[in-house]
Image: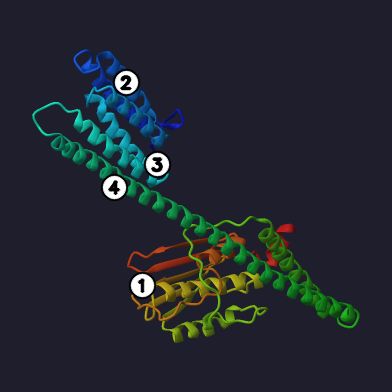
Amino acid sequence: MTVDRIIFGRPLRSVAFDAAVSGLVALFAVAGGVAQPGGWKATGVGIVMALVLLFRRTHPTAVAAVVAALALTQVIVGWGPLGYDVGVLIALYSVVKYADRLRDGVLAGVVAAAGVVLAALQVRGPAAWWASAIYFGLVTGAVWLMGLNVRTRRLYVLSLEERASTLEREREAEARAAVAEERTRIARELHDVVAHSMAVMIVQADGVRFTIDRDPATAREAAKVVADTGRQALEEMRRLVGVLREPSRPEPAAVPDAPGGELSAEPAHRRPALVELPHLLDRFRAAGLRVSCAATGAAVPLPPGLELTVYRVVQESLTNALKHAGVGASVELSLDWSADAVVVRAVDDGRGRPVVRPAPSGGHGLVGMRERVGVYDGSLTAGSALAGGWRVEARLPLPSAPGAEEGKAA
């Protein structure tokens, strides 16, 4: 990594270059010495001109005015064009390139044109004055046009940098908004899960109260349901509080998807379950995806919140495939069950055709999946597949069975 050194509030490279330019002008002034018209007085004017050029980037208009005044003094005393007058061209170039307004560059060009005529009138030699004026004019005009060209390119690059910076800020703001919206959605769904669990606990507790004397076995079973449901509700409440407390984390690589549409059309307070997965796959097949689904291992009952997360990951993975791989793409969906985790994997071949309308989504794409998986301490990987297409894989740890936890506690 390269680090630009700063001196006098400016990059060291720029300061060194300006010092070299000023030194060159001063060298021309000293080289003339006694031989040039005006002698050492002219040399003094040239050195002042060289020192002024040190500030040509930061104060281009003021530098151009001072250099023009020095050149006018040189013409008034009748010294004629001298070697250090190259500083006039440097000042002209600088004001055209660095001035805040192009008007200053145009005014400097007009003053330079008048100076060309005055300098040509003082040239001594066999050639007519107008020949010298044409020569000086061509050189001055070329310098002015070169400064204008560099100014245009410089402003264009600055506009591109500003546009890129603005787009980056907007992208970060959109990512933060998407994360905040998705976390609110997750919190609402987890709240519904907890409320449902509490309702089950109340019903079962009422059942225990009415059956504890008449049917102790049934009462014990109901009490076990209350305990198990309470543990799940407590765990979901912990995750809900974590969602609400944890600050939003924008993901640069995520692209928010617009919610809505028939593929994700679900009532606002309805919680999908894994038993509805075949219906979800049928909807994506009707939309144009060729979806194949396979499951390995023995499926186990999941807590409602974790079951909802698995469903949403499948939904967002297929939506992502439809949006980016296109209609007609093949998607291999698999659910791998093990003793400690369930792995959801969706791999498309990327060989579809573009969709006619934007693919709807139930959330915010990779942002939503990453947030949901993170709530349950899982991991999500997404990227290009080796054979082409896109691969999404989410690993979600399974909670320990209540019986096992009780055994450990004992």
- Give 395 or 41, whichever is nearer the viewer: 41
The structure's colour scheme is: rainbow
Q: Find residue 53 and report its image quarter.
A: top left
Label 4 vs 3, first from the N-terminus: 3
* Residue type, numbered disc 3: Ala
* Residue type, numbered disc 4: Asn
Q: Residue at x 9, y 32 (%)?
A: 127
Measured from the top left, where is residue 337 in percent x and y? 53, 70
Label 1 vs 3, first from the N-terminus: 3
Q: What SS does tag 4 mark? A: helix
Label 3 vs 2, first from the N-terminus: 2
The residue that disc 4 covers is: 149
Q: Residue at x 29, y 32 (%)?
A: 88
Rate crowding at label 2 as few (under 14), some (14 to 19) or many (20 or more) other CA atoms within 10 Å: some
| Whole-number angstrom distance, CA of label 4 to CA of label 3 | 14 Å
The residue that disc 2 covers is: 45
- Give 348 or 9, whichever is nearer the viewer: 9
Q: Is residue 283 left or right of residue 371?
A: left
